Image (tube, coloured by chain):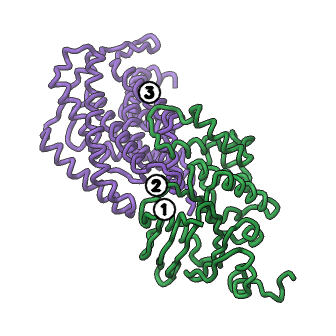
Amino acid sequence: MKPILQAQGLRLAFGGVKAADGIDLDVGEGEFLAIIGPNGAGKTTFINMCTGWLKPQAGRILWRGQDIAGLPPRRITAKGIARSFQLPQLFTEHTVLRNLALAIAAREGAFSLLRPLLRPGWTEEAMEIMRGFGLEFLADTRADALNEGSRKLADIAMAVALKPRLLLMDEPTSGVAASEKLGIVETLARVLRETGVSAVFVEHDMEVVSRFADRVAVWSQGRIVANGPPQAVLADPDVRREVIGIEDAHAAP
Amino acid sequence: MGAWFADNGLLLGLALLDGLASAALIFLVAVGLNLVFGVLRVLNIAHGSLFAIGAYTAAGLGAALGSGALPAWAALGVLILAAALVGAVLGPLIERLLLRRIYAEENVLQLLVTFALFMMLEDVQKLVWGVQPVHHDAAMRLFGTFDVPFGSDFIPFTAYQLFVLPGIAVLVLVGLVWFLRSTLSGRMIVAVTTDREAATAIGINADRVYLLTFTAGAVLAALGGALASPTAAIVPGVGASTIVLSFAVVATAGLGRIEGAALTALMIGLGRSVAVYFFPEAEVLIPYLIMVAVLLVKPQGLFGTLETRRI
C-alpha cells in the first residue's frame, strides 16, 4: 500500500516524559490505522504533531513526500488532513447544519463580509454529508442538545466536510454508551471507505479495533512496540499483558 | 413628590436627554472595546487613544473641509469619514505590528504593551494637535435644535444629540448583532471566539478574524470620538477618561457581550447625567457605583457567563 503519511524519527518530550521517542510510522492510502496503548503513552501527541498543534523536536512528517512538521494547523488542514478531538469541538450554539456549513465555508476559504452563512450549494452539501452519517433528521438541532453518540458523529461529519484525504481521530467512541459504539464506528467506516479517506484513530476498545482497523500500532512510553494486522498484534501475549492489561489466564478462551 | 417634580421636572427631563446622548457615545466606544476583548482576549488600553485621535481627526478634517458651510448630513459624513480613516489605518497597523506578537503572552504583559502604546499615542496627540482645547461643532450646529415637549413647557435640545447620536448607536447595535448572527464572517468571528482550537481545526483563518475584529473595534472607538467632537472641546486626557469609563461599562456588561454593553451604557449615561444636575459631586463616582453594585450581585457582569474552557 502506497504511504500517504510517513512519520520518520519523531521525537517530542515534555520535561522528562518522552511522548515520542523516535517514532517511525506510515499510513497507507485508504488504510485505517488504529493506535492503541496505555494512557499517557503519547498517542494524542502523535495526532497533535501530525496536525500542527505540536512541533516535534526532531524528525520529519512527510505528507505525500513533503515535510509538514511544524506547519500551522490551518495550513495542514488545507492540505487535506483533518482531525477530530477527544471531546467533540462543535460550535454548541449552532445547529448541526450550521456547523457543517461553517466547515464547508472554511474549506472553501470563503470570508465574504455580508453574505449569509447558509447558501444553497453549501446547505445541500451539508445535508448530503448528514445523510451519509444518518444525521439528517438532526439538521436543525443545536449541537449542545445532541446525545453523546450523535455529537461524536456530527463532530466527525464536520471533519469529513473539509474533504480530507486523511482523518485523525482521537478516541472517536470515548464517552459513548457501549451499545452505541459499534454502530458509530460502522457508520464512520462506511462513510470513509466510500470516499476513500485514510484514517488514523486512537482507540481503547479492542473490539472496535479488531473489527475496523486494517493495521494496529501499539504505542508505549513514546515508542511503537508492535505494528501489524489486528489479529496478530492483539494476540501477542506481551501486548495483551502490558498494553491492554489482560492477563492471558483471564482472557476469553 | 409632586412639588419636587414641579420644581425639578424640567431639570430631570434635561438630564435624561443629556444622558441618552452620552449613553450613545459611551456605547460606541465600549462596544468596540468589548468586541475586541471578546475575540482577541486582549484588553486594549490604547482603545481610549483611538477615541481621542478619532475626535481630533474629525475636528481637523471638518475645519479643513469647511464643513460649517456644508449641508448637515455632509458635515456628519465628514465625521464618519474621519473615524473610518483613523480606524482603517491605525487598526491594522496596531494589530499587525504589535498585538499579533503578544496573543500567546500573559495578560499582564498584554496590558503593559497596550498601556505603553496608549502612553506613546498620548504624546503623539500632544505633538500633532497641541495641548489647547480643540473644538469644531459645525455638525451639531447644522442639525439645529428641536423643542422637546415637556408638560406645558418645551426643552430646546440639539437635534444632533437627540436624534443623530442615539440613531447611530442603535444602527451600530442592530448592525453588529445582525453581522455576528447572520453573516459568514460574523459566524467565523463567533466561532473563533467560542473555541479557537476548533475553529482553527476546521481551517478558519484566525489571523484574518483577529485583524478584521480589531479594525472594527478601532473604527468604533474612532467613531465615538469623531461623533463626540462637536459636542465638547477635545482636551488632552480625554483618551484616559474614555478608556476608564469603557472599562466600567465592559466589566458591568460582562466581557464580550454586545447587547449588554448597550444596556450598561444606557444605565451609566443616564446615571451620570442625572448626577450632573442633582448631585454634581457624585458625577465621577456614579459609573463605578453602578459597576460595583452590579458586580456584587452578578460577578460575571449583567450578561456574562462563567467561562468553560475545553482542553
Binning the other alpha carbons within 10 Å of mark 3 as few (below 14), some (14 to 19) or many (20 upward) gives few
Quarter of the image holding residue B61? top left
* Quadrant of the image containing the C terminus of chain B: bottom right
Q: Amino acid at mark 3?
A: Leu
Quarter of the image holding residue A167? bottom right
A170 relative to A225, above or below: above
- The residue labelled by disc 3 is B171
Chain shown in green = A
Q: Amino acid at mark 2?
A: Arg
A42 relative to B278, above or below: below
Picture colour for chain B: purple
Residue drawn at 42 percent across, 62 percent down: A71
Label 3 marks a residue whose chain is: B
User: In this view, which residue lies farthest toward the right?
Assistant: A253
Q: Are marks 3 and 2 on the same chain?
A: no
Task: Indicate which label's residue lies in the foreground, 3 or 2.
Answer: 2
- Asked whether, in this view, residue A216 is left or right of residue A26, the answer is right
In the rendered structure, find residue A74 and report the number of the disc placed on it: 2
Mark 1 vs mark 2, CA separation in Å:
18 Å
- The residue labelled by disc 1 is A64
Task: Indicate which label's residue lies in the foreground, 3 or 1.
Answer: 1
